Structure formats: C-alpha cells, structure tokens
Image (cartoon, helix red, strand yellow):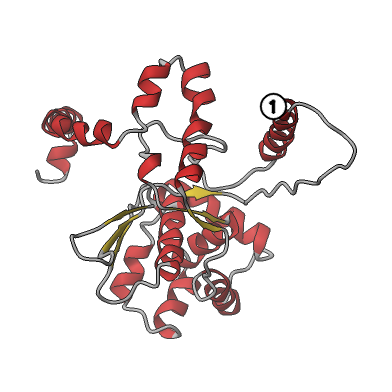
Amino acid sequence: MQRHRRQTSRPRGTVLDVAVGGRVVVENGRLATGDMEAIESAARREASRLWQRMAEMEHNIQGIGDKHVPFIHNVMNTDVVTAVSDKATDGLLVLFNTDEGRRYLVERRGLDSGLVARLAHLGLSSLCNALAAVKTAKYLDLGPDDVVLTVATDGAAMYGSEVAKTVARAFGGRFDAVAAGETWGRTLAAVTTDHLLELTRVDRQRIFNLGYFTWVEQQGVSAQEFGARSRQGFWDGLLDLVPAWDAMIGEFNARSGAAAALGA
C-alpha cells in the first residue's frame, strides 16, 4: 500500500497496488541460556526453518507467488502490508457468483442489483485487493472525504470451476441463503485490521532485501540494477517511458483485435 499526500497535513488518498494472499506464518523465537554462536549462523538456520514452513503452506489466491517480491513493486514507498486469507476470497467468489448469493445481497443486504451483477466480474486476486483495501481504510480511520484506490487484477470468468470446488469443500455441496449470510458475516462484515503492519524504514528495507535471491541470484539481474529500485528517483524516471508504453499497448491491441472488440 502506498499513501499519496497533498500539501495538506492529512492523507487524502490511498493506493493499494500489491495484494498478498494466503495465510500468515509467524515464527516465535526462544532465548537459550548458556549457549553462544555466531549471529549469522543462527540467523541463517532460523531463516531456513521459516522458509521451509512457508514452502509447505499453500493458498488458493492463484497468481500470487509465495516468498516473491515483484520486481516492479516500489517497496521503499510502501506504508502498509496486509495479509488476506484465501478462505475469505473463496467465500466471496461463491457469494458473488451464485444465484443464492446474489439474491441474499439484494434482498437481505439491500445492495443495488446492478452493483451486485458487477461484483461477479471480480476474480480471486481482485477480491483479495478489495478486502485489503477495506482493512487498510479501517486501520487508517478513513472516512467519506478520503479515497482508497485498488485494482481489479483478474476476472471471475477465469475461476468458474473454483466456485463448484469451494461449494463442495467448504459448504457441504450446498450453498443456500444461510450459507450466504454466514459468508457475508465472516468475510465482509467481520473485516478487521488483523495481520496488518504499518512499515518503518527498517521494515521496508527487509522486504526489499527479500527480493535479492529471486532477482539477482536466480534471475541474473545485476546487483546494481536491483539496488537502484530502492531509490525514488528510479521510479520517478519511469514516467518518461509512459508514452512509449502507451504506443506499444495500442499497437498490441490493434494487432490482437482487442481495440476493435472494445470499439476503440
């Protein structure tokens, strides 16, 4: 999450540009008396155990990689990180994409039927982003004069089979009005600020350094190029490339037929 400020003293807008799904792993340390060893050795061993535990965990927010910090994410300009459970995103996918779920939202929660129909366009990652936006807004105590902007990064059409799988796995093969109400209560009505961290500079640097193994050691990015991303000037300079990117997108849409299909 990146917070963009005006020249006033309070934030007026919030942009959530990265959502991280799955479950949160917490490794509790323990002090051992009478023993001594090199700090680096203990840290490596502790990190190895943590990575092993994380590797054994799975989640269903498809497209989000565990232990992976995106190369195009401006980590040093990030204010908040939050975790969202795949149980919540799976439940909302069913709620928004079944007749019983949509009927509950319109008849029992009073939502506009047109809005409910549009909710069916949100895929698992989009639902994760939306929940993270709600958690962040609550944490920052935002109100009607503030704006939270997030991105619908995928569509529900990609996950048609996931609806049936979740109904069978989580709802005993039947999703009715009671299940719809329970899902609303567990996912949206019960959103809290748990599993959320407001970052210090040290926190940002730690997250930034997590990407070293992926991008430098595995993908062959130079250490200089990797490190340049820790400075805001690097990201500001990317704005000069926007016209070229727009031209490439336009060319691709024209060749693929997407522009004609959209009437552009």
- Percent from the top left, x then y, of residue 6? 19, 60
From the image, tell me which residue sits under label 1. Answer: 40
Q: Quadrant of the C terminus?
A: top left
Q: Is residue 144 above or below residue 96?
A: below
- Percent from the top left, x then y, of residue 5? 24, 58
Q: Is residue 219 above or below residue 204?
A: above
240 vs 138, left or right, is left
**Tag 1: Cα neighbours inside 10 Å, few (<14), some, or many (≥20)?**
few
- Percent from the top left, x then y, of residue 117? 34, 67
Q: Residue at x 56, y 71 (%)?
A: 183
81 vs 15, left or right, is right
Q: Residue at x 37, y 38 (%)?
A: 73
Q: Secondary structure at mark 1?
A: helix
Quick one: which residue is furthest to the right in this view? 34
In the image, 62 versus 116, the foreground residue is 62
Amino acid type of the residue tagged 1 in the rendering: Glu
In the image, 71 versus 228, the foreground residue is 228
- Percent from the top left, x then y, of residue 7? 18, 60
Q: Residue at x 52, y 66 (%)?
A: 193
Q: Is residue 80 above or below residue 224?
A: below
Q: How many marks?
A: 1
Q: What is the quadrant of residue 4 in the picture?
A: bottom left
Q: Residue at x 39, y 80 (%)?
A: 106
